Image: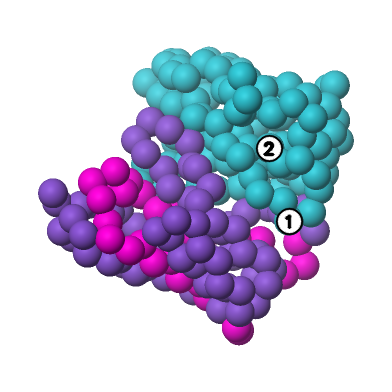
Chain colours: A purple, B cyan
Amino acid sequence: GQQLNQSPQSMFIQEGEDVSMNCTSSSIFNTWLWYKQDPGEGPVLLIALYKAGELTSNGRLTAQFGITRKDSFLNISASIPSDVGIYFCAGTAGGTSYGKLTFGQGTILTVHP
Amino acid sequence: GAGVSQSPRYKVAKRGQDVALRCDPISGHVSLFWYQQALGQGPEFLTYFQNEAQLDKSGLPSDRFFAERPEGSVSTLKIQRTQQEDSAVYLCASSLRTGNQPQHFGDGTRLSIL
């Protein structure tokens, strides 16, 4: 089936540093979304992207839909301890009409105070 | 509540037992999805409902898995004759309309099969 390759698998950073993670696919995706998941909870939507080349911000978070429609990145600026968690990219593959999501493997973010 | 609600939050069952997991989507949401999340992995699609119609069940791992949404709101995922490999978190998500709409997730049911 569809695969999303997400990197890095984990990151250990100091509070205040910027963070970047990305996601690639071998096939075209129509939408890209970024979710954050805390332990014992469901994924929470951070940013949704619908057009190739789109750059969208949500507070300290910025995400882009790659121009080839096969990749996306998420940047977090000036990290804080509450940014700790697992970040997932997700997307809907080309030809899917109803929003079935394919997820990446996740990036585990640890922020040291 | 305003969000997607799932129950129970935790379920422990012996191998071979049947289990039923419930999802209450956000009121008025047309689309409902079930995903399975193994430990350390991203969620994987199981099935999709548009109102009461199950339009895609291609992700269900076997015929032991069955889902329904008879009145187009609450949905139940049933697993018959559970196996140890069924142990996972089962997530439900809903979205307002069909198409590529943002999906809002519940906190999941953590299923452990002994």
The 10 Å Cα crowd at callout 1, few under 14, some 14 to 19, many 20 or more, is many
Residue A36 disc label: none
Identify which residue is drawn at 39% across, 59% down.
A60
Residue B94 disc label: 2
**Label 2 vs label 1: CA separation?**
12 Å
Tell which residue pokes out farthest to the bottom in this image. Answer: A68
- Do discs 2 and 1 share a chain? yes
State the SS at label 2: strand
Give amino acid for label 2. Ser
Identify which residue is drawn at 54% across, 56% down.
A47
| Left or right: residue B90 compared with residue B87 | right
Q: Chain of mark 2?
A: B
The span shown in magenta is A67-96
Identify the mark nearer the N-term, 2 or 1: 2
Residue A49: x, y in percent?
62, 64
Identify which residue is drawn at 61% across, 19% down.
B1
User: Which quarter of the picture shows residue B97?
Assistant: top right
Q: Quadrant of the N terminus of chain A?
A: bottom right
Counting the numbered discs, the total is 2
Above or below: residue A83 compared with residue A12: above
State the SS at label 1: loop
Give amino acid for label 1. Asn
Residue tagged by mark 1? B100
User: Which quarter of the picture shows residue A107?
Assistant: bottom left
The 10 Å Cα crowd at callout 2, few under 14, some 14 to 19, many 20 or more, is many
Q: Is residue A90 magenta?
A: yes
Q: Is residue A4 at least partly visible in the picture?
A: no
Tell which residue pokes out farthest to the front in this image. Answer: A59
